[in-house]
Image (spheres, rainbow, N blue to C red):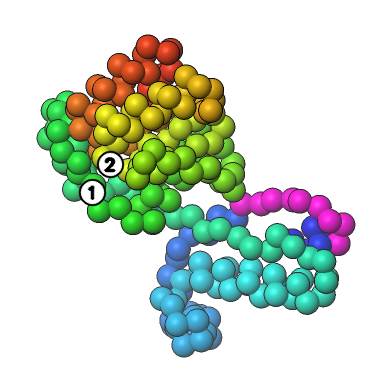
Amino acid sequence: MQLNAEDGGNRKFILVQLDEKIDEKKSKIAYDFVKNELKCEPTIYEITKERLLRAAKKISHDYANASNLDFSEYEIVAKDEKELEKLEKLELSLSDNLFSDFDINKINEILTSYKLADGIALDAAFKIIAFNEYKAYYLNKNLYLVYPNFNAECTKLLMQNLQNKDLICERVILYNASFTSSEHKTLKDALNQIGIKLQVRF
């Protein structure tokens, strides 16, 4: 961060930190600092995060033109066993929307995993494409359909955009659990007509 501030560079880095708990007996000062000052569960991760924040604050103070001092946090989590169990019981039937309660954290989790799968930089920004009330995500000629309720009208609007070249798309990627079998089939049949690949992901 400091080198970028010194020469106007655009260096990027990934910092990986285990969420290791701080032993109160071995590191009482660090334990008390995180618990009492940061008001967080005492872990090494919180110490690392605070160091980054303080470094960014100092660089901002020392270099008037410093920029790009923000950072994003990502967490690797185990797949929810209940979700996996539901998927196993589907027996190829997609008649139910298993995850109807979407929040921004769930969306970000799914889209981040798709970026990693497609070799896309984590800081690359999606463009939001609207099909009536439905919100899709577009990046690198891929269209990601994560939300449920992508109905026949949405498919019609998507096809119009593709055929009119308003949207240049090589792949359409859908989140399996958000689509019913009929929505899946309607979309697949439509895309097959114009030679665009539909990819289903979990």
Q: Disc 1 marks which residue? A: 100
> Residue 19's x, y, as percent?
45, 63
Does residue 202 belong to the magenta stretch?
A: no
Q: Is residue 40 left or right of residue 154?
A: right
- Side (left or right) of 14 relative to 182: right
Name which residue lies at 36% across and 13% down: 192
Q: Which mark is residue 148?
A: 2
Q: Residue shown at 69%/51% (left/top)?
A: 12
Image quadrant where residue 94 sits: top left
Image: magenta residue range? 6-14
Count of numbered badges drawn on the protein: 2
Relative to 147, is 35 above or below? Answer: below
The amino acid pointed to by label 1 is Ser
46 relative to 123, above or below:
below
Residue 157, position as x, y percentages in the image: 38, 30
Question: Disc 1 versus disc 2: distance between alpha carbons?
Answer: 7 Å
Looking at the rendered structure, the secondary structure element under dot 1 is: loop
Dividing the picture into quarters, in which one does residue 40 lie? bottom left
Name which residue lies at 58% across and 73% down.
50
Say whether marks 1 and 2 touch (CB < 8 Å): yes
Q: Secondary structure at mark 2?
A: loop
Residue found 19% across the figure and 27% down from its top: 181
